[in-house]
């Protein structure tokens, strides 16, 4: 009844289940939400900001009779916070959807929240709708085009998705091929890794398409913004051919829209890139 929701990717699933009234505390403030219902709930006070994962407001959390904390895997960097919540008698559920190797695996967490909210039938129905949507794209022919998906971090390194990650799988389902086809150890569940710029250049310079992931370091407004991050980008095939795209900042919070995101990638690969929902072309 009084969930402290820290894992942002779960919010879209709760909204789909009409379960927002079960969340009384958020680990993200109003200006950090791209989901309208969540932003409004923070602004009107029906959900209170209780501090981010690393510095929760324990006093507020206890005063709200919190009966479950849903954390992202970032909590593993602050194990003392998890321990403290549990000491107060608050169960902690760590949401692992970012580790999924298939986009539907990420959406299927909907079924878990359906169990928690007593809405299993609705969760099954909504999940099947996403299965059907993705199936329609999956049956499309391969384009043979390669795609690099990454962002440049504050240290100047490229943060890339591993080959067995759900984003890599979405590119494959859309008829493309993720440029790094054997990246990462399958036994390591983390979904991303950092590469020095020279190593990234060697592996991704011939990619047909670039998708810049804006969700961490912010959106780009032009190709010049990308070139400002490294002069090496001028030598990339995708830059020279004008196939550079950027994600919108709401990409990772839109867990119920993975079919639409995959469709966007498909349309990008086939040249039908006007009015995409979650990615846009950089000029």
Image (cartoon, grey):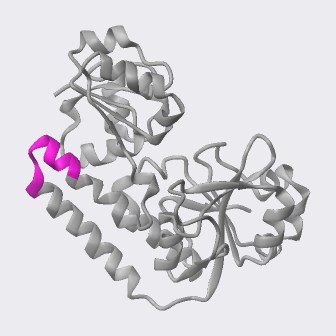
Most foreground residue, 141 or 282: 141
Quadrant location of residue 182? bottom right
Q: Position of residue 254 (x, y in %)?
A: 40, 51
State the predominant SS element of the stretch in magenta: helix
Taking the image as shown, residue 58 lies to the left or right of residue 24, namely right
* 118 in the magenta segment: yes
Q: Position of residue 3 (x, y in %)?
A: 25, 29
Q: Which residues are magenta?
A: 112-121
How many marks overall?
Answer: 0
Residue under the image location 37 percent in, 54 percent down: 255
On screen, 34 above or below 3? below
Q: Position of residue 141 (x, y in %)?
A: 48, 91
Can the viewer see residue 91 in this picture? yes
Most foreground residue, 79 or 73: 79
Can the viewer see residue 275 in this picture? no
Q: Quadrant of the N terminus?
A: top left
Q: Position of residue 110 (x, y in %)?
A: 25, 53
Taking the image as shown, residue 173 lies to the left or right of residue 194, namely left
Quadrant location of residue 100? bottom left
* 173 in the magenta segment: no
Residue under the image location 47 percent in, 33 percent down: 75
């Amino acid at each position: 009844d009084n969930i402290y929701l820290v894992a942002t990717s779960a919010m879209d699933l709760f909204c789909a289940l009409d379960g927002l009234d079960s969340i009384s505390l958020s680990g993200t403030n109003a200006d950090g939400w791209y989901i309208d219902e969540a932003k409004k709930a923070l602004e009107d006070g029906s959900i209170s900001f209780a501090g981010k994962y690393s510095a929760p407001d324990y006093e507020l959390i206890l005063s709200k009779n919190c009966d479950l904390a849903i954390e992202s895997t970032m909590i593993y960097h602050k194990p003392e916070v998890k321990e403290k919540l549990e000491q107060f008698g608050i169960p902690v559920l760590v949401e692992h959807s970012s580790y999924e190797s298939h986009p539907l695996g990420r959406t299927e967490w909907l079924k878990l929240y359906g169990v928690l909210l007593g809405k299993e039938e609705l969760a099954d129905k909504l999940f099947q709708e996403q299965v059907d949507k993705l199936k329609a794209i999956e049956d499309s022919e391969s384009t043979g085009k390669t795609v690099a998906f990454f962002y440049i971090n504050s240290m100047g390194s490229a943060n890339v998705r591993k080959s067995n990650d759900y984003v890599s799988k979405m590119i494959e389902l859309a008829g493309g091929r993720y440029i790094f086809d054997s990246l990462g150890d399958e036994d390591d569940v983390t979904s991303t890794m950092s590469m020095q710029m020279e190593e990234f250049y060697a592996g991704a310079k011939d990619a047909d398409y670039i998708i810049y992931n804006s969700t961490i370091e912010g959106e780009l407004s032009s190709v010049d913004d990308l070139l400002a991050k490294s002069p090496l980008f001028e030598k990339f095939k995708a830059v020279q051919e004008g196939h550079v795209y950027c994600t919108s900042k709401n990409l990772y919070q839109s867990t119920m829209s993975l079919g639409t995101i995959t469709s966007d990638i498909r349309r990008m690969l086939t040249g039908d890139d006007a009015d995409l929902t979650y990615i846009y072309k950089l000029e």
